[in-house]
Image (cartoon, helix red, strand yellow):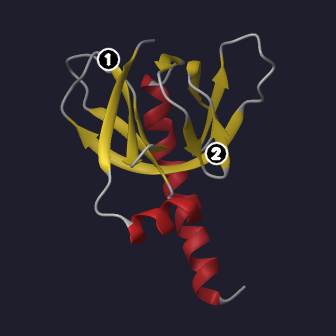
Amino acid sequence: MNTKVYKSLAAFALLAMVVQPIFAQSAGALKITIPFNFTIGKTQLPSGDYTIQSLSGAEVRVQSDGNDNRPSVIFLTVPAGSKGTSETGKLVFNRYGDQYFLSEIWQPVNSRERALGRALIKSRAEIELAKKMSRPEATVLAAKK
């Protein structure tokens, strides 16, 4: 790998170590029903009930709540910033036609905190769709703890 890649990875790791403890303080498992098939990275998942949980560092796990033996998906995220308060968590999906890509995860917070979000890095498939189509349409689903 070249020097730029190493520097980028080091910066990402440092940022993840700083931001993760803040995210983890308000983080808990989110429960959500996703009414459409969606993609995380290279993994396509069917509609259904899911639990989303922040793990260590920048890792997040999405696991099916069904009894269909679907594997959990663990993926890396980056900080998405902070917004006003929200007592419910939410997931944001980018929609291109009938294809949905998980884009952001927002944890619920109390009235004294600012909402902290995590963003997923776009996959190659999403980048290719974005080149072919106009801007994605955001689809937001509310989640509960």
**Residue 2 higher or lower than 67, as above or below:** below
- Residue 55: name its quadrant: top right
Residue 129 relative to residue 7: left or right: left
Distance in Å between CA atoms under marks 2 and 1: 22 Å
- Residue name at image x 66 percent, y 20 percent: 64
- Disc 2 is placed on an element classified as strand
Q: Quadrant of the C terminus?
A: top left
Residue 22 percent across, percent down from the top left: 43, 36
Helix, strand or loop at mark 1: loop
Q: Residue furthest right?
A: 69
Disc 1 marks a residue whose amino acid type is: Thr
- Please indicate, yes or no, whether residue 123 appears anywhere in the rendered image: no
**Residue annotated with mark 1:** 88
- In this view, the residue in front, 119 or 139, is 139
Q: Which residue sits at x=41%, y=71%?
A: 131
Q: Earlier in the sequence, mark 2 or mark 1?
A: 2
- Disc 2 marks which residue? 75
The image position of residue 26, as x and y in percent, is: 42, 24
| Callout 2 amino acid | Phe
Tell me the number on the disc at residue 98: none
Residue at the extreme bottom of the image, as rendered: 2
* 5 relative to 142, above or below: below
Residue 105: x, y in percent?
43, 36
On screen, residue 18 above or below 63? below
